[in-house]
Image (cartoon, grey):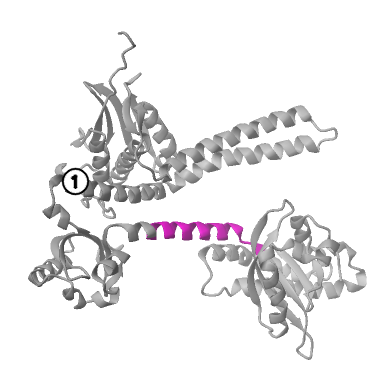
Amino acid sequence: MFNTVESITWESRRAMTRLHSLAIGVAIDYLIEPTPAVSLFEKRQRRVYRSSGAALSNIIERGADEPGLSIQALPGFVLSASIEGQIEYLSPDILRYTGKPAQDVQSDWSACVHPDDVERCRNLWTQLAASSESIEVEIRLRRHDGSYRWFRSAVRSIRDSADRTIRCCAVAWDVEDRVQAQQALEAQAQRLRLIVDTIPGSVWHVGRSGLEYLNGFVTEYTGKRPEELIDPGWQDVLHPDDIEYFRNTWLQTVNEGKPLSIEFRLRRHDGMFRWFRTQGKEIRGDDGSVTGWVGVDIDIDDARRAAEAEAQDALRQSQGRLARAAQLATVGELSASIAHEINQPLTAIAANAQACHSWLSKDPAILDKARATIANIIQDVHGAAVVVKRIRALFKESAPMKTPLNVNELIEEVIHFMHYELERRSIRVELQLQSQPPLTLADRVQIQQVLVNLLQNGADALERSGEQAMILLIRSRAEGADMVVEVLDNGVGFEDAEPLFDAFFTTKADGLGMGLAICRSIIETHAGRIWAAHNDPSGAVFGFALPVMAPIRPAGG
């Protein structure tokens, strides 16, 4: 019917205004009454629409005089089409997005839609012919640069006095960021589920109403489904001599609200009993009350029966898997820093690209300045690649690789990576690093993980202390045959250093007690040592020492 808003004749202005009002009505009806399943991301988008409600009302009122304005004011795409699927009107934003003239879109609209979504769009017309309700759909639209982005659309049929559908009206908005975020969250959840299900032990969660979660290990080991182990079903898989002891220990744990630690024998699906150790920790709500427990049951039968060497080997394997989980958790805690690190070079690239476009748009084009700007873009791209490479190292799962390591360089790298998070917490970092330190032979990523954990713990202790001046001091020095690194804070400190490095021991209300245990495992694997001491006058000192590399003598020396 219409190719552009400018082609509308004066006689058709009032009819077009009614179409505008219907399009706006679709948007308002859908956005003011969201469905219960709508995501938080979409709710935020819809608040933007709702905040413009008064402005949209004014647009409708003066739509007879300014029909183009009502469409252009909508923060999205608007179109109308016949029930046969022939497009009659396209808002200017659609044409700008696709980079196609109106007649091209009208003659072959499927070229603007992702091939996998075309059939779904065609089926939409059939649904609209039989319904007066709004229909929601998500499709991918092709942008002028050839890329596809996800859009969410609310479509409503327009019916005549005989209640027959004569055309449909739609409003659509870009939801690419929401889709990408949802896909990233689903991928992360899948990775975490895989990690939990591959841990060689039972992972469980008990809430106020009883058992709420068991990982796949339990079913595989006992041959019973989780629902079969709900009280009193768990007694069927415990050794008869351990049932009373287990029950009393559990009741004591519940009554006192303390961590759980117990060893018992668990029957395997073939009838054999094996020893397990349970370590559990209470979950507390905002009011401090216990709302449940989480824990792991680890098979310790081989450790009790086999030689010490075999037991140590099994323990190192378990620590490796737990270290990987802690590595992912550390990256999650530093998500703000990661976003900040990536955003800096991307912002510079966007600004330089805009400047380059401006120079090239001149008549004549200012090529010298355009070239200089392109050079800046290339430099920023290389900078972004360095940032991504450094972040990938935190995610990467690989066997330890020991190489010559300058601990000062690693300290500065970790500080640079965490500076955004530390600044957000108003924590100042001071360095006392030995110049030209001797090299150590170590796995860079693992020692980096130790430093991040110690700095994170120090920052948490400072925040809990309430000190006005929150300072983290990092110092390095050569001491005999070792390279020593220490992290000092003036935070809340601790009472007893001995249990700090034990698994599942924590001084934090929301901690799991694995960070320092993994740090100790990493340092000891490097033939080093790690310790904790009181800082004077307040706070704590956490340090570790790594053997320095033997100097390489020249040939013939």
The residue drawn where x is 28% and y is 46% is 515
Of the pair 331 and 122, the residue shown nearer to us: 122
Residue where numbered disc 1 is placed: 312
Q: Which residues are magenta?
A: 173-193
Q: Is residue 393 visible?
A: yes
Q: Is residue 189 magenta?
A: yes
The residue drawn where x is 81% and y is 68% is 89
Q: Is residue 551 magenta?
A: no
Rendering quarter of residue 259: bottom left
Position of 527 with respect to 144 (left or right) is left
* Label 1 SS: helix
Q: Is residue 66 visible?
A: no
The residue drawn where x is 74% and y is 61% is 112
Q: Position of residue 273 (x, y in %)?
A: 15, 66
Rendering quarter of residue 141: bottom right
Position of 321 with respect to 370 (left or right) is left
Q: Position of residue 409 (x, y in %)?
A: 39, 28
